[in-house]
Image (cartoon, rainbow, N blue to C red):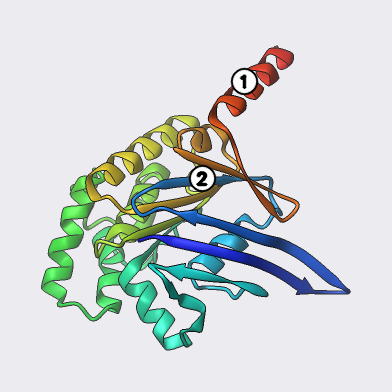
Amino acid sequence: MNISIQSLSKHFKKQGKIQVLQELSFDIESGGISAIEGASGEGKSTFLYIVGTLDEPSTGKILYDGKEILQMNQNQRAKFRAKNLGFIFQHHYLLPDFTVLENTMMPLLIRRENRSSAQKESKKILDMVGLGDRLSHYPDEISGGEMARAGVARALAGNKSLILADEPTGNLDRKNVRMLRDLIWELHEKMKFTLVIVTHDRELARSAPKRYTLSEGRLHERNPLQKEEKERKEKKRES
């Protein structure tokens, strides 16, 4: 899925005008991985929710394969999300009263897919993320790292073409950060979905082929050679 973001802006009116995003324009190629990093409060999540049709921009357009998504009504957007978009969240948002398998099946059932086929597909993706032996466990019966993998499985269920990840490693220790990153990269290689990650985790962002920084409402693409040299200098000064 090719995504074209054109002159996207977002502001809030709270005791005056608060500008969050300013005239963002860039393209996301189908099957690519893009990381957008920035400090807390810079509008990363707001940007992701707009791209995921969960929020409205103040101005601008978002084209998915040439089709303007913001012209759809709410019902059409909901159907579009259910078919095409998967979300990975920092807090996972697994439903506590449902098993790992049932949580993974949920997006497919919302799409009104047959329960038997939804169960079969969910078991397959849970095997891929290493949770084939946790199907009947509830969220409070698995570790934080396993919860993160369950969140990935739920996002990918249904062969989604675009995965949007909001601080996916935010609650994990460094070991689990690397494990989750390697897992997502491996799944991306197999399944060829488009992946957009917003994060403040530099290590995660460095792994992405396309890397951007969101600062003061504006998006800047980072040159790989320049960024690595800058980070080497920063580490040298810190030592």
Which quadrant of the figure has residue 137? bottom left
The residue at which mark 2 appears reads as 35
Q: Residue at x 41, y 68 (%)?
A: 64
Sort mark 2 into few (<14), some (14-19) or many (20+) by Cα contacts within 10 Å.
many
Image vertical order of residue 66 relative to residue 44, above or below: below
Q: Residue at x 74, y 70 (%)?
A: 11
Image vertical order of residue 33 relative to residue 61, above or below: above
At label 1, the amino acid type is Glu
Observer-nearest of 25 and 51: 25
Measured from the top left, where is residue 98 in percent x and y? 31, 67
In three-dimensional space, the C-alpha distance between marks 2 and 1, rounded to whole angstroms, equals 19 Å
Mark 1 secondary-structure assignment: helix
Whether pointer 2 and pointer 1 mark residues with C-beta atoms closer than 8 Å, the reply is no
First in sequence: mark 2 or mark 1? 2
Q: Is residue 31 left or right of residue 216?
A: left
At label 2, the amino acid type is Ala
Mark 2 secondary-structure assignment: strand
Measured from the top left, where is residue 63 in percent x and y? 46, 69
